[in-house]
Image: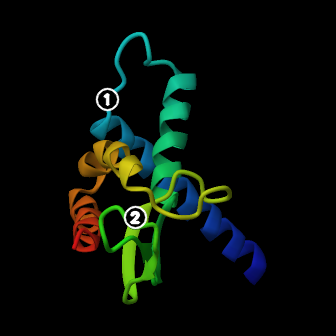
């Protein structure tokens, strides 16, 4: 009884969310010939979902060279970073040079989230 009803409700909500995601994907990144077939749309959806799923919030103390030309590293005060990661399993940390590529998608998908990520990176540029 209750378990079956709950399962049906979860399935229904998941189907609605999947449809909403696909609709938003098509609205935000319209498919263009010759990339308008189902396989390309599925790959695009996986890429966007992977990028969104790769957003993370990190905190800690960075190691940095504080003097030009010095080899000495110094721990900076504790800070936080909201960023995308290139690979959650292999590189679970942000890289500034990757953020430009992430931003190309994120600024169109969720501009406010993009601005939050950008603000975190700018805060590190002290």
Direction from residue 119 to residue 21 in the image, left or right: right
Of the residues under marks 2 and 1, which one precedes in the sequence?
1
Quadrant position of residue 46: top right
Quadrant position of residue 11: bottom right
Direction from residue 63 to residue 105 in the image, left or right: left
Quote the CA–CA distance across marks 2 and 1: 26 Å
Q: Quadrant of the N terminus?
A: bottom right
Q: Position of residue 98 (x, y in %)?
A: 41, 48
Vertical arrangement, residue 14 with respect to residue 67, above or below: above
Residue under the point 45% across and 45% down: 48
Q: Position of residue 114 (x, y in %)?
A: 27, 59
Direction from residue 47 to residue 65 in the image, left or right: left
Q: Quadrant of the C terminus?
A: bottom left
SS category of the residue bearing label 2: strand
- Residue carrying label 2: 83
**How many labels, in total?**
2
Q: Which colouring convention does the figure follow?
A: rainbow
Q: Position of residue 15 (x, y in %)?
A: 56, 54
**Numbered mark located on residue 30 in the image:** 1
Residue under the point 37% across and 11% down: 33
Tell which tag, 2 or 1, sits nearer the viewer.
Answer: 2
Residue under the point 50% across and 18% down: 37
Q: Position of residue 49 (x, y in %)?
A: 50, 50
Question: Depth check: 64 or 2 in front?
Answer: 64
């Amino acid at each position: 009884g209750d378990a079956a009803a709950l399962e049906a409700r979860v399935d229904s909500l998941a189907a609605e969310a999947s449809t909403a995601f696909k609709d938003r994907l098509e609205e935000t990144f319209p498919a263009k010939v010759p990339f308008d077939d189902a396989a390309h749309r599925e790959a695009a959806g996986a890429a966007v979902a992977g990028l969104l799923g790769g957003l993370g919030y990190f905190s800690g103390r960075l190691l940095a060279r504080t003097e030009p030309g010095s080899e000495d590293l110094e721990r900076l005060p504790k800070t936080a970073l909201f960023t995308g990661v290139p690979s959650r399993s292999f590189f679970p940390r942000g890289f500034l040079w990757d953020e430009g590529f992430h931003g190309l998608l994120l600024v169109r998908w969720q501009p406010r989230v993009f601005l939050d990520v950008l603000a975190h990176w700018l805060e590190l540029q002290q």
